Image: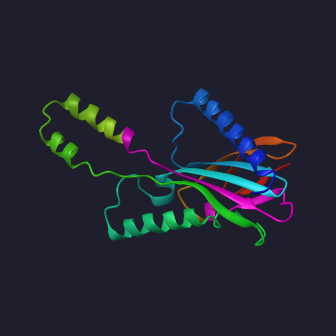
């Protein structure tokens, strides 16, 4: 472990705290279909990136896979996210990449809830149950990567998320470098993150 890694971790925690307090102040629900989030910390030769996205952006659905095709999509997405090399173009091959944290949605079968719905008699109860299930259905993928490199990294990074996942329309990005910090929104037409 290099000497700057504790500094990188502290900086990353600060960006998460700042980002979460901003998101909470703006909206009680940060789960927005079509939008994914990227938190980036670049400290000298280390780059830490956290990617968070609603499952629907990556899978096309936010429920348990039903068909073999959906199961394959889920498995392929998990494998790709765990690998990490898919997200940023131009990171030198000499950088050591590790996946520090990974969370995938866990979908439960709701057979008992389905049975309960068959016995509901009032329209109000159905509406209440339906909205409760929709709220529970929101699921996110979350992954954090660390690139540990031999030399300083470029200050502009092309983000490849749009190339891999058609469901991602925008990326909300918070970033910190040794000297600066920023906030930006990337899109399919504007996928380059400038860290200066």
Q: Quadrant of the N terminus?
A: bottom right
Which region shows up in magenta?
135-163
Is 70 on the left-hand or right-hand side of 129? right
Q: Position of residue 182 (x, y in %)?
A: 78, 41
Is 133 on the left-hand or right-hand side of 18? left
Q: For the point 71% across and 37% down, which residue is it? A: 14
In the image shown, does 97 or 21 lie closer to the viewer? 97
In the image shown, does 143 or 113 lie closer to the viewer? 143
Is 109 on the left-hand or right-hand side of 42? left
Which residue in the rendered view is the most extreme toward the bottom? 93
- Residue 135 higher or lower than 73, as above or below: above
Query: Magenta stretch containing residue 27, yes or no?
Result: no
In the image shown, does 18 or 190 lie closer to the viewer? 18
Q: Position of residue 36 (x, y in %)?
A: 59, 49
In the image shown, does 114 or 142 lie closer to the viewer? 142
- Residue 27 higher or lower than 64, as above or below: above
User: In the rendered image, which quarter is residue 174 located in?
Assistant: top right
Q: Position of residue 53 (x, y in %)?
A: 55, 50
Is 134 on the left-hand or right-hand side of 60? left
Q: Position of residue 184 (x, y in %)?
A: 73, 44
- Residue 142 higher or lower than 20, as above or below: below
């Amino acid at each position: 472990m290099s000497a700057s890694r504790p500094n990188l971790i502290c900086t990353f925690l600060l960006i998460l705290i700042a980002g979460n307090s901003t998101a909470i102040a703006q909206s009680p629900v940060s789960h927005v279909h079509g939008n994914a989030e990227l938190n980036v910390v670049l400290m000298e030769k280390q780059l830490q990136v956290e990617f968070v996205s609603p499952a629907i952006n990556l899978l096309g659905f936010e429920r348990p896979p039903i068909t073999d095709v959906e199961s394959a999509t889920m498995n392929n997405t998990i494998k790709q996210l765990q690998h990490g090399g898919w997200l940023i173009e131009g990171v030198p091959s000499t950088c050591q990449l590790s996946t520090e944290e990974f969370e995938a949605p866990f979908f439960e079968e709701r057979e008992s809830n389905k049975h309960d719905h068959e016995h509901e008699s009032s329209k109000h109860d159905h509406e209440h149950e339906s909205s409760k299930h929709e709220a529970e259905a929101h699921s996110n993928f979350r992954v954090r990567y660390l690139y540990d490199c031999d030399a300083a990294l470029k200050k502009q990074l092309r983000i490849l998320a749009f190339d891999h996942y058609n469901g991602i329309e925008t990326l909300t990005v918070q970033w910190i470098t040794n000297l600066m910090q920023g906030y930006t929104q990337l899109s399919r037409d504007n996928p380059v993150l400038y860290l200066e």
